[in-house]
Image (cartoon, rainbow, N blue to C red):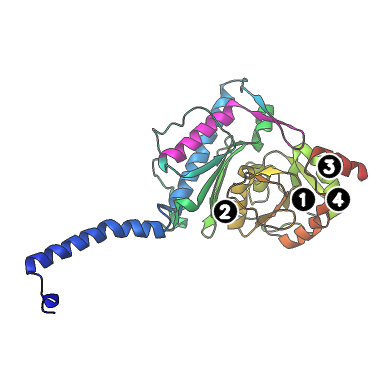
Amino acid sequence: MAALGRRLPRPALALLVLLLAACGFLVLPSLLGAAGGGQRLDLRELLALSVAAAEAGGRRVRAVHEAGPDLQQRSKGQTQEGAEELLTAGDLQSHRCMASLWASTFPGIRVISEEHDEAALDLSEPWDGKIPLEIQEMVPSGQTVSMESVTVWIDPLDATQEYTEGLLSYVTTMVCVAVDGKPVIGVIHKPFTGFTAWALVGHGANVSARESYDERSPRLIVSRSHAGTVRTFSQKAFGINVNIIPAGGAGYKVLSLLNLNKAEQPDQADAYLHITFIKKWDICAGNAVLSALGGHMTTLDGKDIDYLDSPGNKEGLIASVGLDHQELVKKVNGLEEQRLTFPAHMRRYCDAL
């Protein structure tokens, strides 16, 4: 029993304390890191990088167009509406620029882009870390999320068809940061005017909603590729006098819902309606912008859109800000069984009307 009560000499005790402290110094951070989800990313930095990436990609898009008439366009196939899906040098150069900026700044971050390229990304020029004053004033530092929870959605060139036709006001580059599948940061950049809309849900945006919207007979902005089909659908939902605005690009359509001048945004709409399949890189940024302004982008039956893995949204969408979104959903949801996904369905529906 006496041996159990023996005390260590002072030098040995001091050495033991130092060893335990050293072990704690080495082990505790790793345990905290595991509990906190690994590397933490500052939301203000993510927003600033999103703006930088969208604008850098936009410069490539504009440079390719200004270099000459040959955009090196080729077909990637057809959309589910039967329209040709084009790829140009502008798409690829913007993709390489935007994806490289993310990969070099945050190695290992999950990035999903519309385009895929065999060329290796250039990791030699990471983001310079500059945060615009406007973002500094609106978004406090220290708001962090784990890298594992983040998915970055990139659309290097939205409205490629219109880009090849010279309808440049429709063209945008977009970046969205989703956290646990929810759109949190949205950036929509217009390369041919230089305008950039950005938003961080819960903190604000550099754009705003308009003061009023027409809820009784809303102006609906829809895709140019199947405006006629959407018109028949919309007349069933909103009445024969509904105003349909055909436009290119999902980013452009979201901007049409906001309080922007005619120089930046020629069209103004009350709601954005899409009744067929659409890719999530087309809509994630706009979803985040509308959410930050108190608006909504949902499927036609009113469900939130998840931005975790699957790149496609098969359930259509309706987007609004400043309107009773649930009332809009009720009007289109009555026609949900007639919603169209494939060209054959679209033809049958049109014939039935």
C-alpha separation, residue under disc 3 versus residue under disc 2 = 30 Å
**Of 301 and 321, the residue lying toward us:** 301
- Residues shaded magenta: 77-104
Q: Identify the amino acid type marked 4.
A: Gln
Amino acid at dot 2 = Gly
Identify the mark nearer the N-term, 1 or 2. 2
* Nearer-the-camera pick, 36 or 267: 36
Q: CA distance from mark 1 to mark 4?
A: 12 Å
Tell me the distance, in whole angstroms, between the alpha carbons under discs 1 and 2.
Answer: 30 Å
Kind of residue at badge 1: Arg
Task: Kindly check if marks 1 and 4 are in contact, taking CB atoms under 8 A apart as contact.
Answer: no
Residue 232 x, y percent position in the rendering = 86, 46
> Number of numbered discs present?
4
**Mark 1 or mark 3: which is in front?**
3
Question: Which mark lies nearer to you, 3 or 4?
Answer: 3
Q: Secondary structure at mark 4?
A: helix
Residue found at the far right of this picture? 352
* Disc 3 residue type (three-letter): His
What residue is disc 2 on?
181
Using the image as rendered, state which of residue 275 and residue 169 is in the foreground. Answer: 275
The reply to whether discs 1 and 2 touch (Cβ–Cβ < 8 Å) is: no
Of badges 1 and 2, the one in the foreground is 2
Q: CA distance from mark 4 to mark 2?
A: 34 Å
Q: Image point 13% across, 79% down: which residue?
A: 1
Which residue shows up at 10% across the image and 79% down it? 2
Location of residue 95 in the rendering, given as x and y in whole percent from the top left corner? 54, 34
